[in-house]
Amino acid sequence: MLKGKVALVTGSTSGIGLGIARALAAQGAGLVLNGFGDREEIDALRNEIAGAHGIKVTYSPADMQKPAEIASMIETAMRDHGRVDIVVNNAGIQHTAPVHEFPVERWDAVIAINLTAPFLVTRAVLPQMVARKWGRIINIGSTHGFVASVQKSAYVASKHGILGFTKAVALETARTGVTCNAICPGWVLTPLVQKQIDDLAARERLSPEAARERLLGEKQPSLAFTTPEQVGAMAVFLCSDAASNMHGACVPMDGAWLAQ
Ligand code: NAD
């Protein structure tokens, strides 16, 4: 379905971003991977995905906290692939602390990576999408784009912000053939969440299984994690013709977290 298109997925060396990159590649899209990690492992991943689907896969180590690196990531993607048709603004970090103890430097990092980077990427890729009259911008929001949790002030602010940004871009692009939407997962078992499970287990002296169940039980009535593969399938749907009139939608995949 996406043969001939090129997708840039930020933060795609792990977790949800990797799930989305794999799903888009399986539809034939060329890929720009981005994120941190061991260079040899990333090269192996690049070769594996390229070989499995007969597509070109490149990698950018750009740090989403650094505007100059974001600009050069887009320039390199345009040079290597000639186009960027799909952008998934996925890279994100978490930091937990009560607001009065929240380190200013961590606040700045969360806002820079989770909110400002999607703005900078979108701003840079949009003109060539509009010129071709087709594009897909998919922002990875969160249930924390709708509701809050304690000790997550920066994350909750960034995710509420990204949903507002999604709607603003959707309005500006509504008649251009470009769509902008957000996917809002509840708990997905990735390294980002594993760290919170480990912290909970240590704090409450729980086994890993008990900590996992406690984490799910507090928020996610289905008691099941959303998977990176499911988020990837939703991203593929948002790239399909069936979703061509979805503009500014913020789609929860949250095991009824927000239904409560
Ligand atoms: P993860 O930690 O598994 O992966 C994050 C990815 O972003 C990695 O590839 C990492 O290398 C990359 N990254 C981190 N900092 C970066 C930076 N400065 N520059 C470039 N890349 C960077 O996390 P995840 O759980 O897969 O989260 C991905 C997105 O999904 C985030 O936006 C997160 O807020 C969101 N999300 C996650 C969950 C969840 O339960 N895991 C739920 C809702 C939303």
Image (cartoon, grey):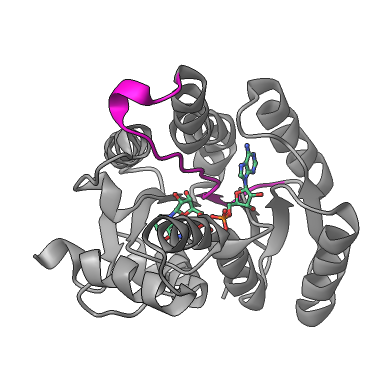
Is 101 part of what is drawn in magenta?
yes
Q: Residue at (81%, 63%) from the top-left corner? A: 56
Is 98 part of what is drawn in magenta?
yes
Left or right of residue 17: residue 163: left
Above or below, comparing residue 231 to residue 133 in the picture? below
Left or right of residue 153: residue 260: left
Q: Residue at (28%, 68%) from the top-left corner? A: 254
Above or below, comparing residue 22 to residue 11 in the picture? below
81 or 225, nearer to the observer: 225
| Displayed quadrant of residue 151 | top left
Q: Where residue 149 sits: x, y (%)? A: 24, 46
| Displayed quadrant of residue 215 | bottom left
Q: Where residue 11 sits: x, y (%)? A: 62, 50
Q: Residue at (52%, 56%) from the top-left corner? A: 195
Residue 40 seen in this snapshot: yes
Q: Residue at (27%, 38%) from the top-left corner? A: 160
202 or 120, nearer to the observer: 202
Q: Where residue 76 sits: x, y (%)? A: 79, 38
Q: Which residues are drawn in magenta? A: 83-103
